[in-house]
Image (tube, rainbow, N blue to C red):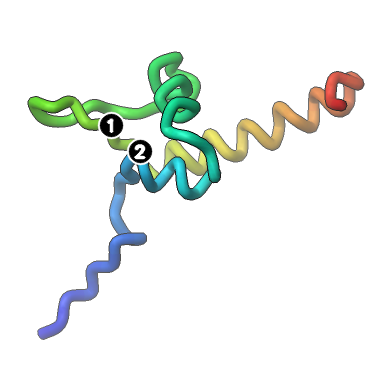
Amino acid sequence: MESQYKPDDSRFMTLTDVCKTLDVSSAIVYGLLRSGELPGIQVGPKKVWRIERSRFEEYITAQYALVRERIKHGEVE
């Protein structure tokens, strides 16, 4: 029987996944994780970052709302 698992179906994203999806550097994503703006967890003895896919989607939704508010208040160039 063939496995139905696909990498995109995983619950967690890697730092690289997030970087590629947002098309930003790892330094930017590390900053978001360390500040708590993007919720993530550190796993294992090497404390690698993992971001729950649903939390990532919530972050994106919140960013859209934030930008709409900034536009509304004339804060976007």
Of callouts 2 and 1, which one flags the residue occurring earlier in the amino acid sequence?
2
Residue 22's disc is none
Q: Which picture quadrant has residue 5? A: bottom left
Residue topped by disc 2: 15
**Residue 49, percent from left and from top:** 28, 31
Q: Which residue is at the front of the view, 54 or 28?
A: 28
State how far apart marks 2 and 1 are (Cα): 6 Å
> Which type of secondary structure does the marked residue at label 1 adopt?
strand
Amino acid on which disc 2 is placed: Leu
Q: Which residue is at the front of the view, 43 or 69?
A: 43
**Residue 28, percent from left and from top:** 49, 27
Q: Residue at x 54, y 45 (%)?
A: 23
Residue 6 as seen in the image, left or right of residue 28: left
Q: Which picture quadrant has residue 72? A: top right
Q: Residue at x 17, y 76 (%)?
A: 3
Q: Residues within 10 Å of mark 1 (few under 14, many from 20)?
A: some
* Quarter of the N terminus within the rendering: bottom left
Residue 67 as seen in the image, left or right of residue 63: right
